[in-house]
Amino acid sequence: MRFRFVLPALILSALPLHAQQPAPAPLEVRYEQFTLDNGLTVILHRDASVPVVSLNIWYHVGSANERPGRTGFAHLFEHLMFEGSGHVPEGAFDTLLEAAGATNNGSTDVDRTNYFIDLPANALELALYLESDRMGYLLDTMSPERVNGQRDVVKNERRQSYENRPYGMASLELDRMLWPEGHPYSWPTIGSMEDLTAASQDDVVAFFKTYYTPNNASLVIAGDIDLARTRALVESWFGDIPRGPVVQPVAPPPAVLTGITKKTLTDQVQLPRLYLGWLTPREFAPGDAALEVAASILADGKNSRLYRRLVYDMQIAQDVEAVQQGAALGGSFLIVATARPGHTAAEIETIVDEEIDRLRQAPPEAREVRRVLNQIEASFYRAMERVGGFGGKANQLNAYYVAGGGPDFFAEDLARYTALSPADVQAAVVRWLPSDRRVELVVEPETKR
Amino acid sequence: MTARRVRRGVILAAALGAVVSAQERPDRSKPPALAPAPELRLPPVARRALSNGLRVWVIESHEVPIVQLSLVVRAGGADDPAGQFGAASLTAAMLDEGAGTRSALEIADAMEFLGATLATASSFDASFVRLNVPVGHLNEALPLVADVALRPTFPDKDLERLRQERLTALLQARDDPASIAGMAFPRIVFGAGHRYGTGMAGTEASLKALSAGALRAFHATSYQPANATLLVVGDTTADSVMPRLESAFGSWRPAAPIGRPAAVPAAAQIGQRQVFLVDKPGAAQSQIRIGWVGVPRSTPDYFPLLVLNTALGGSFTSRLNQNLREEHGYAYGAGSAFDMRLSAGPFVAAAGVQTDKTAEAVREFFNELTAIREPLDAGELAKTKNYIALGFPSEFETSTDLARRLEEVVVYGLADDYVERYIGRVMAVTADSVRRAAQQYIQPSRFAVVVVGDRKTIEPGLRALNLGPMRVMTVEEAIGP
């Protein structure tokens, strides 16, 4: 997700063409932060608007920490976190939570693995019991059968989300083309079937002891809570879990594109699809926000440049998408478009090149940039309403904390966008989206039998 | 894809250790006892009307300076005239493609510039114009929304563009086994002649036949103040917003006699169990859909069915997911649903399963569909009811959540105190009422079984299950012309 929170003063200054409205109450995300002796960072935020609480924990490990031959392991491990722990029988994690009216989930990405439990405010201690038990005692009841069970589930997740999905294998190919061999972003978070087959209980034990430690995690509790009582409860439930070793940072090989790499895949699809990719700055680095705005100018909304030309005017494409994906070790910028029947990826590529070139030659119009920034600012407001889930405040507090700016990075994050001029957007396109250093992937329909 | 995030070294706060050492070790021998669940306190609904009779419901929610507005029109795909399947859907889609004096591009530009999102949509039972806007720009957005809802212009060139987009989407549906199953199952259960047998967008033939005149006619007879309700949720009050709504919507008058199409007729129930195997050569998974004609939203058995379906396939710990995913590992997930509409929609149990376990998975589906007809034990019943009832407050976190709940109340004519009474009615469900609902609405011996997958691998096993007559179909046969 791209857009977060906003300060009211900035909203007003952003819309000089309109009469000023009375200033809304300041949008604040006040928090309390402390660290347990064992290194667990804890962030508390009170929002009593609805009687619910979200417990959100990030382990600072993702598929980038995997070793060759064990791709997909961080994600497989995430699945095992729901299967029971020392004092929680298999199946009880979900049964206890559902009986309390809770929902929960987890997700794995290249740099982190996160988990949330959203539940009625009265049931907070149940979440603390379950979350601390799997941090402290996961291995007590781990078994090869449990690993086998989730291995099968994850293989079916791979089949459902990649192998049996139209164009599903393209993103895996694209990552291999963008990142050099040995770079952790070159392999997929879902992993290969061979590596999933090879994963063993010994791997689970080693991974848990290395990465699933209090000092390698950050815990956010947000919602209808009493701050002092919640702090005491966290100290009680998590305080006796032993600290683990210091995690060594990932040291990836340099990632630079030196020319154009082209590839064509075939798939059981009706229409060709074009993927263009560049290597770009990591998240929050200079250029990251400008490229997000460039992506919106290119492909968000009917008036965006690529949508307008390819889909609206020429109607040679069914859809077009542009995205800047900043991650810890680097970023990538993607443009993806699907051809209409009778049209080709090559036709689309010509137009995409014209439009990127136009952004290289001249800055976008002020109104184009303003339109994007106004949308970003409104999105920050909308995101303030929800506490839990992957898109709520609890997860965002954790994300900002992990990014290093502190949990209350909302204003600074927004300022990354509002500070941009049209010339900044142009400069980012010139610097980061060169025509002679990129990858070009085309998915073509299999020839009909 | 989930967002990728930056990582830096862990920051340690200073001088906080002392508190921890004083803690006692918690008792992990059993889950902690929980205090009573908090009560859900919903803001009141102010029910008003404009001078032209348009009903307006206003719910205050001042957490963030945003207003969510939904115009609910009680006409949808079920009201498509004969031979014009897709009319309601395309009418809704065309609303913001030209309205008042503005073009599609001008409408989009204006809305985005205000930081607003405007969405038009339709279901079988209703059509919607939804606006989410910073409260400071509500005044500027309202006339635009009124243009979009009341004065769409249906320009020919934009209609042709959307028509081609939709035809292309129908073509692309053939790529995706889940989409194929999603189209084939209702077509088999309801038949191509029943409105519920075809998706909201219609068929290739009906899409090609829809004219701007047909859409104008649908708009004129359906989009009328007497047929609509305006929901406003967010950082405003009824007293402050009513005059503004009056000036935007108060002059809305019917443009034609109101359409009162007969309700969609109840579909004939399936007579006997049959298997439909749709060949998708080389598919890595088989998409399974099992079910029949379910119930209308007005069913008196709504709450027993809600509990029944949640236990069967409506939550992570539901029987289908536990069996297909956790116990056997055949699927990433499995579930079931009663799609309740003004007339009886489908009941369907569904999963994508690995190709070489297709027959085994279908067998497990039937084991669970048969077992759920026996009474739930007290523990499972309590867990299921609590999951629904205690989780209910979390469905009201955002103004959009609130608006969606009220849309349901409007579309299905639910009682004014429906939301307030919801939790009590869930908790009042008994094991006996669930069993009776299961006996009546879950009859596995009569279900249609639709499997989209690699025929050469899965056909022998499916035949060996002896579920009933099998029809092998191509994708084209399954989703129809």
Image (tube, rainbow, N blue to C red):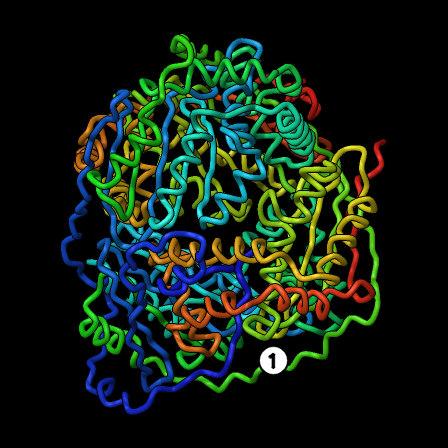
- Is residue B344 in sight in this rendering? yes
Write down the chain letter for disc 1: A
Relative vertical location of residue A200 with respect to residue B315 in this rendering, above or below: below
Q: What kind of residue is marked 1?
A: Val
Q: Nearer the viewer, residue B312 or B268?
A: B268
Dot 1 falls on a residue whose secondary structure is loop
Residue A398 x, y percent position in the rendering: 41, 70
The number of numbered badges drawn on the structure is 1
Quarter occupied by residue B147: top left
Q: Is residue B423 left or right of residue A394?
A: left
Quarter occupied by residue B149: top left
Task: Name the residue: 42% across, 75% down.
Answer: A401
Relative vertical location of residue B136 with respect to residue A63 in this rendering, above or below: above
Residue A249 x, y percent position in the rendering: 57, 83
Q: Is residue B302 left or right of residue A287?
A: left
Task: Name the residue: 56% across, 37% down.
Answer: B360
Q: Which residue is mark 1?
A: A250
Residue B229 x, y percent position in the rendering: 31, 27
Q: Is residue A402 left or right of residue B253?
A: right
- Is residue A200 in sight in this rendering? no
The image quadrant where one finds the N terminus of chain B is: bottom right
Q: Nearer the viewer, residue A77 or A34?
A: A34
The image quadrant where one finds the C terminus of chain B is: top right
Residue A422 x, y percent position in the rendering: 61, 63
